[in-house]
Amino acid sequence: MSTASQARATNAANECRPSLARGLWALTYRELKKWLKDPVMLIMFVLQPLIWMGLLGKSMNIQGLFSSGNLGNIEIPNITIPTVYGNVTIPGTLLAKQLQQEFSKIGTSVMQNTFGVADYFSFMAVGMVSMIVMTTTMFSGMSIVWDRRLGFLDKVISTPVSRAAIIFAKILNATFRAMFQASVILALAYLLGLQLSSSFTLLNLLGVYAAIFLLGVGLSAVFIAFSIRSTRMERPMQFISLITMPLMFASNTFFPTKLMPDWMQAIANVNPLTYLTDAIRRLTILPLDASALIWDFTYLGLFAAVLTSIGIVLAWRYLTR
Amino acid sequence: MTDEVIKAENLTKIFNKSLVAVDHINFSVREGEIFGFLGPNGAGKTTTINMLITVLKPTEGRASVLGFDVVKQANEVRKVIGVVPQEYTADEDLTGYENIILCADLYGIPRDIAKKRALELLELVELTEFRDKRVETYSGGMRRRLELACGLINRPKVLFLDEPTLGLDVQTRAATWEYIRRLKKEYGMTIFMTTHYLEEADALCDRIAIIDHGKIIVTGSPSELKDSLGGDVITITIKENADVTDIIRSVENVKEVRKENGSYRIKAAKGEATAPLIIEALRRKGFTVTRLSLTEPTLNEVYLEYTGRAIRDTEESKEAFRMHRITLRRARAG
């Protein structure tokens, strides 16, 4: 190897100034562009939670359970109470009416105590937002398998682009998608009757995005690390369908955790989905509770930090086989 | 004195601790030459290329490109090489121009230079009029040319071509060969390519290594390899009824002479040069040659000689086969 030709090579190399930001932007831009050019997938992804939300949220009319109409016609006989002034008769119809009114009040209070809000739809619509954040990040993480199969990943690896940019582009793409889908679901939920709390401001929306961002980053990092060596879609797919259900149900997505059996509560209490859902609920439909929010965000922040570190270390190690 | 642009020493790749894809190979590529790796599918060609372009880590041995170690100085290697992979890796949802700019971004080439160069490269591969069309609409040949343009965006010193004409029709293949020759001539680029087409190796490569089962069996220029078979076969017939075996044998380069049915079957190195000498020698002794035919051995015979079988697809792994089919399907889609 003569110094002359190495010098020439170095000259050519000097012109290349691969930077993390540049590579990250280029790769993320590619992903987002791909995504926007596939509106069918976009609609499909929104459609599924929309169906869940519309059908499940509306059919599980839990507040309806406690409505006066649901008590039906109760027949209460007239009650006669003997007093010193003679017998006083209270008509049964009056009692029944009173009871129905009380039942409705009790129902509202049960709803408030259980769900924090008076209607189940608002409660579960927020859960739906979490669900879409979870599924979107999982599937997006898997797109690295496609890049591997199509040879795109190998080509990118053979360029001097920062290795971190390759992984972060995937993470960012998954997270942006999740944020977008979440926005769509929130907007649709609002149109379908989501009741915002009186303390809701547009600033809360930023909090919602921050929470989604943290969970999205953590979850997608795990999925990218998980699928980085695969050349087949089957295994990650299987894994996703395996863990989606437990993550969804062993959390406060559809039902409050406090009414679950202890063992399930234990799972729900470490399930990051619980914290995301709780954070979004507190920011949208529930009255503001700063200390609870801080705890939610701390957990989500830790989750993102730990899992992203693990994900990136694994991805780094296995990017080059 | 030529430089060794690529050097591999005992380069080995073992997958899953048992599958030996590349088995202690040694070779070097000189500056400015087109070096071909020839072998059937599954012989270890792509694995070798992937180690040289820093996509795979060697299990054993070492390799360097322009003096940079492919493991320890991987990033230096990446800056000075261009890669045209076997698959169509251009993004179908982006336009040809966007794809080239994406590549430029990955190399961190300043935007203004990148834009100018992208247009030049599109011109070079004759895709200017399709620059703003999505790659989805490109034919196989166009995609291959776009890959070539992407691989050239950083003005590489060494270009790696993995099966550059896989799945292309005859015309497109010939056109691709032309581009490759032009690159070598105009940019003085060193080119490392793999192929399982014998005629491709013969037409393009200055030197060839035949690889089979992860081992390099023989290395040399196409003509050296053909000569190593014992040379060309010249068949002549003379007008006179006499035995001229000794006269022919005395001619330079003649290795073997046999009289068969009134004609002479001569094995000789450099047949085209030797045949006139034989005619001349016979004429001087008063004999007249009435018929002459010359058959040159092809790489096909070389391949047969060294591997003991004709070059054709061997049993591939399922995944490789599937990838192959994806590539072919996309190539046909235009």
Image (cartoon, rainbow, N blue to C red):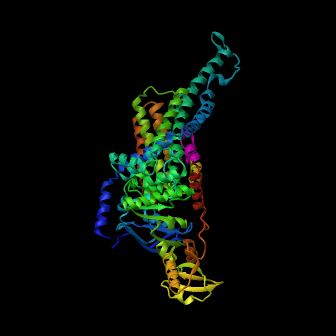
Q: Quadrant of residue A39?
A: top right
Visible residue check, residue A268 = yes
Q: Position of residue A149 (x, y in %)?
A: 53, 55
Look at the picture and state if B77 lies above or below B116: below
Q: Position of residue A67 (x, y in %)?
A: 62, 24
Closer to us: B10 or B84: B84
Look at the picture and state if B169 lies above or below A48: below
Q: Quadrant of residue B258?
A: bottom right
Q: What stretch of residues is rendered in magenta?
A: A244-268
| Magenta region includes residue A253 | yes
Query: Furthest-top residue in view?
Result: A85
The prevailing secondary structure element of the residues shown in magenta is helix
Look at the picture and state if A300 lies above or below A287: below
Residue sitting at x 54%, y 66% = B199
Q: Position of residue A147 (x, y in %)?
A: 50, 52
Q: Position of residue A48 (x, y in %)?
A: 59, 38
Residue sitting at x 49%, y 57% = B176
| Magenta region includes residue B185 | no
Closer to us: A240 or B121: B121
Could you tell me which quadrant the N terminus of chain A lies in? Answer: bottom left
Closer to us: B237 or B223: B237
Residue sitting at x 33%, y 45% = B112
Q: In the image, is A45 to the left or to the right of A93?
A: left
